[in-house]
Image (cartoon, rainbow, N blue to C red):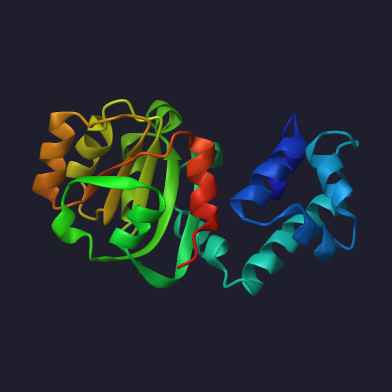
């Protein structure tokens, strides 16, 4: 986290990205750092000069401390992903739940209509990860995808900007560990092959009807198990 911020051409943008990934409002982070919210806003909007190492360290420590106070949901999720060769810009959101969530309840939150596997919607979900599918299939190796699915066992995977839904299901077919739910966002109906593969693998496949990726992320971050 600190390295990505300090090495970025736009450190303010990276600070905002990580703050939002940790689900921490500006005002809460500002209180922890004992600064005004405008200071956080100015850094994120590049209205202040690039933060030094001391500022970045306090920023990172603040996010980690606030997350720990809230149950360590984000830290735990990233700990699971440590072995996955996945650039963080592909991850749009991630969380571990403090208590298991019924899959049906989770789907209702993000207006996800089940296409196949409705009989499995009473399973528990332990967390979720939101992936930008365009970036993922452009940048991730096959081995990285296998590791990603390994780390999402008993969790939901949401692919944004999905075109057919075929690629996620083809990739998952050869993996031993599989997510408990796949949600596609950005299309009206999945490719028939995706439906067939989901049925064979026993994985619920759903389509989120939320209009934009931004609104989808907003609903996820407001979701309280």
- What residue lies at 69% left-to-right and 40% top-to-bottom? 14
Q: Is residue 121 above or below residue 43?
A: below
Q: Residue 84's x, y, as percent?
A: 43, 48
Q: Residue 107's x, y, as percent?
A: 33, 53
Q: Is residue 144 left or right of residue 49?
A: left
The residue nearer to you, when weighing 218 against 134, is 218
Q: Residue 12's x, y, as percent?
A: 77, 38
The residue nearer to you, when weighing 81 against 47, is 47
Q: Is residue 94 left or right of residue 140?
A: right
Q: Is residue 42 left or right of residue 153?
A: right
Q: Residue 176's x, y, as percent?
A: 20, 53
- What residue lies at 78% left-to-right and 40% top-to-bottom? 44
Count of numbered marks: 0
Give the quarter of the figure containing the C terminus.
Answer: bottom left
| Res 8 seen here | yes
- What residue lies at 63% left-to-right and 71% top-to-bottom? 68
| Res 146 seen here | no
């Amino acid at each position: 986290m600190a390295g990505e911020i300090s090495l970025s051409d736009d450190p303010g943008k990276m600070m905002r990205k990580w703050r939002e990934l940790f689900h921490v409002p500006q005002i809460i982070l500002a209180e922890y750092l004992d600064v005004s919210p405008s200071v956080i806003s100015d850094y994120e909007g590049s209205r202040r000069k690039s933060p030094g190492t001391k500022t970045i360290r306090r920023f990172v420590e603040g996010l980690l401390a606030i997350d720990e106070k809230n149950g360590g949901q984000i830290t735990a999720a990233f700990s699971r992903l440590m072995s996955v060769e996945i650039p963080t810009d592909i991850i749009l959101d991630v969380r571990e739940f403090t208590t298991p969530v019924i899959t049906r309840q989770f789907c209702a939150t993000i207006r996800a209509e089940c296409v196949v596997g409705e009989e499995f919607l009473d399973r528990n979900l332990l967390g979720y990860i939101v992936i930008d599918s365009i970036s993922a299939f452009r940048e991730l190796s096959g081995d990285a995808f296998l590791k990603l699915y390994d780390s999402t066992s008993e969790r939901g995977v949401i692919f944004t900007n999905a075109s057919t839904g075929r690629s996620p299901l083809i990739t998952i077919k050869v993996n031993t560990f599989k997510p408990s739910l796949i949600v596609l966002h950005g299309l009206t109906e999945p490719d028939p092959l995706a439906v067939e593969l989901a049925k064979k693998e026993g994985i619920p496949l759903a389509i989120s009807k939320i209009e934009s990726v931004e609104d989808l992320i907003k609903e996820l971050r407001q979701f309280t198990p």
